[in-house]
Image (spheres, helix red, strand yellow):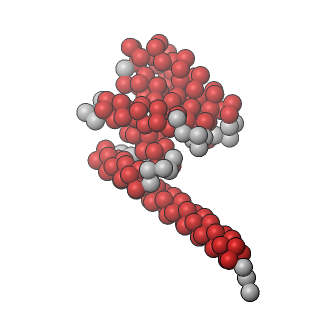
Amino acid sequence: MTSPISKLRLLAIALMTATSLLCNAQDAQMGQLIDGLVTSIDRSQPQTFLEGIAGLKRLEAMYPDAVAPKFYTALESLNFSVLNPHAEQTDAMLEETGRRIEELEKRQDMDQSDLNTLKGFLYMVRIVQDPAQNGRRYYMDVIRYFDKALKLNPDNELAKGLQEKFFEGMNQSMQ
């Protein structure tokens, strides 16, 4: 026979295993939902872009402790804003994205390379919105954040791609 203490240990181990499996299942389900929303966005259609962002915000509400929905909501909001810099939703979206990035900054589980990528992208969008006014103001911030992101993780493809686009855009504007 097993002692009551052994039964409690066994029960505790079983509960931890079940919780771990449930969390992994939730993470997998959340990942599938995010992937489905992101891939369904037609970036050439602002309305589907906005619908995808709204879906990501719903995921944030469903998974309030998860970083991924917040990250992808910020990322897709910045993608919308860079492609539609003068849309009526862009200013409010950028303000909200700035707050979301500040929230992510406080999280211990937020990848710092990804965080710096979002910060650099935010300033990059500000430059795209108004190059004459914001170019000089944010140019060094964009470079600093992308450099820091790549220093923390040299394999960060998003940071590499955005940094390339930024330099291409700056070279074109100087010609």
Query: In terms of depth relative to the viewer, which is nearer, 61 or 86?
Result: 61
Q: Quadrant of the N terminus?
A: bottom right
Query: In terms of depth relative to the viewer, which is nearer, 135 or 59?
Result: 59
What number of labels is visible? 0
Query: In terms of depth relative to the viewer, which is nearer, 44 or 31?
Result: 31
Residue sitting at 53 percent across and 20 percent down?
Answer: 141
Query: In the rendered image of this protein, does residue 107 appear above or below residue 146?
Result: below
Percent coordinates x, y for residue 51 in the rendering: 31, 51
Residue placed furthest toward the front: 4
Residue sitting at 52 percent across and 35 percent down?
Answer: 106
Residue placed furthest toward the bottom: 1
Q: Is residue 62 left or right of residue 35?
A: left
Query: In the rendered image of this protein, does residue 41 appear above or below residue 115?
Result: below
Percent coordinates x, y for residue 98 in the rendering: 42, 31
Residue sitting at 41 percent across and 17 percent down?
Answer: 134
Q: Is residue 1 left or right of residue 43?
A: right
Query: In the rendered image of this protein, does residue 34 appear above or below residue 96?
Result: below
Regarding residue 103, the answer to whether it shows in the image is yes
Residue placed furthest toward the right: 1
Percent coordinates x, y for residue 158 in the rendering: 57, 40
Percent coordinates x, y for residue 115 in the rendering: 55, 35
Regarding residue 158, the answer to whether it shows in the image is no
Query: In terms of depth relative to the viewer, which is nearer, 116 or 37?
Result: 116
Residue sitting at 49 percent across and 15 percent down?
Answer: 174
